[in-house]
Every structure is written in C-alpha cells, then in structure tokens.
Amino acid sequence: PHNINIAKAAAKRAALISRLAVHLPRGKYLRQLAKGLMIGKISYAAAAVTIPRLNNECKGPNAAHRAIQVAINDAARSIVGCKRRDHIHVRDLLERAGLPSLNEVAAKAVALETWKCFYSNEGGGGARNP
C-alpha cells in the first residue's frame, strides 16, 4: 500500500523533472531538484518499507520497488539528457546523473536508523542507548 503510493509519487516527480529539463540546463540544477523532490520523498520511509538487497542472490524486487527504480532511472535520463532507446547501463546512468539507486537509499536509511538506535541521547541524561 505505502510502496504503491511512493511509486506513484516518484513517477509524478520524474515526469516533473522531465518537463523542467526543457527549461533548465541539464546538470547540477536538475540534479538538485531530483534529489530534493524525488530522493527525499523516497528516503523518508525507505527504512520502514524497503529491504536493502545485500547481494545479487536475493530475489528480485516487487512491482512497487521496480516502479520506484524506473522512476529514478527516468529522472536520471532527464538529468543526463539521454533517452531510453540509448540503452545505457543503469549503474552508469545513475553515476553520471549523481543519483542513488533505490537499494542505496534503503541501505543508507537502514544504516542511519541503526546508528540512531545506538547513539541517540533519548535515554535520559545524555546516556547512550544500550
């Protein structure tokens, strides 16, 4: 349910970035908008709803995760200025665009939440949580 809503929102934001690419120069401005509008929306709940894949032996992503990754890829294409028919490898595309993959976003979110569990000061008196 929540993943489907995030996938729809990511697709809308990718379309917005594509429309903005007509009026803005490709590169740092579009990258900043994509990170703020799209990656921010995806990452705020990534630790709760997405399980990071640690190796390629894990089963493939479900339909909602695939749709989110496709939206990220579309935004990256808008930033770089290439089309789907150019068949650029996704890893290279994301690297050139400066955007993280959904798996990278999920891994970072899980690592951040884990760090917060161990080092937050919510234990009282500045004590570290056990």
Image: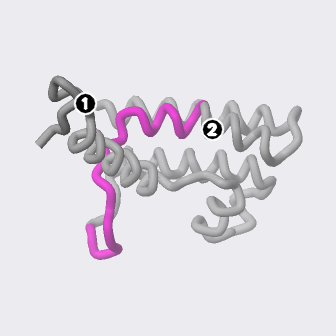
Secondary structure at numbered mark 2: helix
Q: Nearer the viewer, residue 51 or 83?
A: 51
Q: In this view, does 72 lie above or below 90?
A: above
Q: In this view, does 16 lie above or below 111?
A: above
Secondary structure at numbered mark 1: loop
Q: Is residue 48 visible?
A: no
Q: On the rendered structure, is 95 left or right of 113?
A: right
Type of amino acid under label 1: Asn
x, y percentage for residue 74?
64, 49
Type of amino acid under label 2: Ala
Asked whether the residues under the numbered discs 1 and 2 touch, taking CB atoms below 8 Å apart as contact, a structural biologist would say: no
The residue stretch that appears in magenta: 37-58
Identify the image quadrant of the C terminus.
top left
Indicate which disc, 1 or 2, sits on the residue closer to the N terminus.
Answer: 2
Q: Which residue is drawn at 68% across and 69% down?
A: 88
Q: Which residue is at the far bottom?
A: 57
Q: Nearer the viewer, residue 86 or 106?
A: 106
Q: Can residue 105 be seen in this view?
A: yes
Count of numbered tags? 2
Determine which residue is flagged by label 2. Answer: 14
> Picture quarter containing residue 94?
bottom right
x, y percentage for residue 37?
60, 31
Question: Which mark, by number, is residue 121?
Answer: 1
x, y percentage for residue 126?
23, 29
Does 40 appear in magenta? yes
> Picture quarter containing residue 87?
bottom right
